[in-house]
Image (cartoon, grey):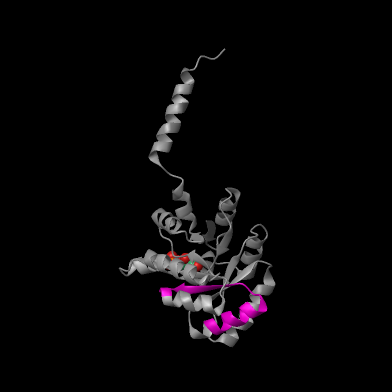
């Protein structure tokens, strides 16, 4: 299972990278806006130490505009994956990117049928948004389960990125399903290491160690 980090915060990515937990990074316009920094500068900084795919999103709504952006963004770094929204225009752009050898990540996917279209267009990655589905009372993880089954049925090579992760249970459920990738916000990654019995166990070992006679 690969871990991508879902943020445009360079320090958070660096921290996760130092812990050996970064196989790639996903950004989106909202995450970039949150940093209040120049996009290109942020991307160059991330790419200086992250060698796995870094998702960079287009903002055009027509295929031609998306392609223009995709080619430009792809020229910035060696490991770009161009994030393209799930629309017919987006799918047209994905197809051309696939033909040109540009990696893509089809974003804003909320149903297995949309995931089929992304795979047929030749997407490198597909990103079903789990948390946003949960938010409206639909079980997001069911989309991951169905998509994984469908891709296996037909041998689609598009990798599934479980996106819009809100808490550690999402990561656990994604892993049980066998999703290729989870893109994890830094605060969720932080929480994954925690268990009260670990803390209690460390304290007990250290307390007992004090009782060991020293020469
Ligand atoms: C994924 O690629 C998106 O950047 C992200 O997971 C969206 O998450 P949100 O629903 O928390 O905004």
Q: Residue furthest top?
A: 215
Q: Nearer the viewer, residue 98 or 31?
A: 98
Seen at 46% across and 66% down, the residue is 148
Magenta stretch bounds: 91-112
- On the image, the x and y values in percent for residue 61 come to 52, 84
Q: Is residue 5 magenta?
A: no
x and y percentages locating residue 32 in the rendered image? 54, 68
Residue 140: tell me if it is visible: yes
Q: Residue at 60% across / 49% down in the picture? A: 18
- Is residue 61 at least partly visible in the picture? no
From the viewer's perspective, tell me whether residue 110 is left or right of residue 125: left
Residue closest to the far front: 153
Q: Position of residue 142 (x, y in %)?
A: 37, 66
Q: Nearer the viewer, residue 168 or 2?
A: 2
Q: In the displayed image of the protein, which residue is found farthest to the left?
A: 137
x 59%, y 54%: residue? 14
| Total numbered labels | 0
The residue under the point 69% across, 74% down is 75
Q: Quadrant of the C terminus?
A: top right
């Amino acid at each position: 299972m690969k871990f991508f980090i879902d943020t445009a915060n360079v320090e958070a990515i660096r921290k996760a990278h130092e812990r050996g937990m970064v196989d790639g990074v996903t950004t989106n316009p909202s995450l970039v806006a949150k940093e209040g920094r120049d996009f290109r500068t942020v991307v160059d900084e991330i790419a200086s130490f992250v060698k796995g795919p870094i998702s960079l999103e287009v903002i055009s709504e027509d295929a031609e505009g998306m392609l223009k952006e995709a080619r430009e963004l792809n020229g910035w770094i060696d490991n770009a994956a161009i994030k393209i929204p799930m629309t017919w225009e987006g799918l047209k752009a994905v197809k051309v990117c696939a033909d040109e050898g540009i990696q893509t990540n089809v974003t804003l996917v909320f149903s297995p049928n949309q995931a089929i279209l992304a795979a047929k267009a030749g997407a490198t990655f597909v990103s079903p948004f789990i948390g946003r589905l949960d938010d409206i009372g639909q079980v997001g993880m069911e989309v991951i389960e169905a998509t994984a089954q469908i891709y296996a049925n037909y041998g689609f090579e598009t990798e599934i990125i479980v996106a819009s992760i809100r808490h550690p249970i999402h990561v656990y459920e994604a892993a049980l399903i066998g999703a290729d990738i989870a893109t994890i916000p830094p605060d969720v990654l932080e929480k994954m290491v925690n268990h009260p019995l670990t803390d209690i166990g460390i304290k007990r070992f250290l307390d007992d160690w004090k009782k060991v006679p020293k020469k």
